[in-house]
Amino acid sequence: MSSTDGFTTCLWFDGQAEEAAHFYVSVFKNSSIGRIERHNEATMGAPGSVLTIEFTANGQKFVGLNGGPEFKFTEAISFQIFCADQEEVDYYWNKLTENGGEGGPCGWLKDKYGVSWQVIPEGLIEMIGDADPQKALRATQAMMSMGKLDIAELRKAYAGA
């Protein structure tokens, strides 16, 4: 990656950067593994072990850094996945919560590495932001009662059904 590539998100891991990169590449389309930089005698890690790994997930650039146990992921930063339909919502929710991930409220979840995600169905932002305050309220109340978001139930609440 060069300085003309725009933004790259650096994710700090405690030894799982390569595993995480391969996981994200397996979950998202338009993904690939890039350059891997390894520790040498001048760095703090075991020589030959992964220091950083560049990867692209869903067209977004990332670098995984094996920085150690000093920092952990929190919900203060999350990645939003906008989904076209319920099948896509279900796919991302299931993939990102499997093997140690955990679902949260309102479409939020943490994957097995502790990274926070928001799995957002198409139309949700418009429903909860509708100019009709009653429609927006019903959609928001429905969303607040869910873990994984259910598009059909959100639409029913929004319509007042």
Image (cartoon, rainbow, N blue to C red):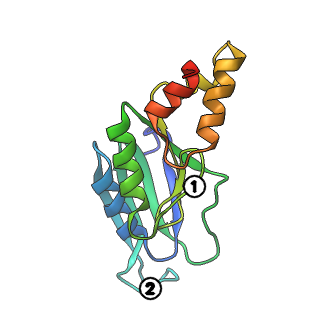
Of callouts 2 and 1, which one flags the residue occurring earlier in the amino acid sequence? 2
* Looking at the image, residue 14 lies above or below residue 107: below
Closer to the camera, 73 or 86? 86
Q: Amino acid at mark 1?
A: Gly
SS for dot 2: loop
Determine the image quadrant of residue 74. bottom right
Q: Amino acid at mark 2?
A: Glu
Q: Would you name the residue on which mark 2 appears?
A: 41
- Spatial CA distance of label 2 from label 1 is 42 Å
Residue found at the very far right of the displayed protein? 133
Q: Residue at x 36, y 61 (%)?
A: 21
Q: Would you name the residue on which mark 1 appears?
A: 104
**Quadrant of the image for the C terminus?**
top right
Residue 13 lies, in percent from the top left, at 51, 69
Residue found at the very far top of the displayed protein? 131
How many other residues sit within 10 Å of disc 1, few (<14), some (14-19) or many (≥20)? some
Closer mark to the observer between disc 2 and disc 1: 1
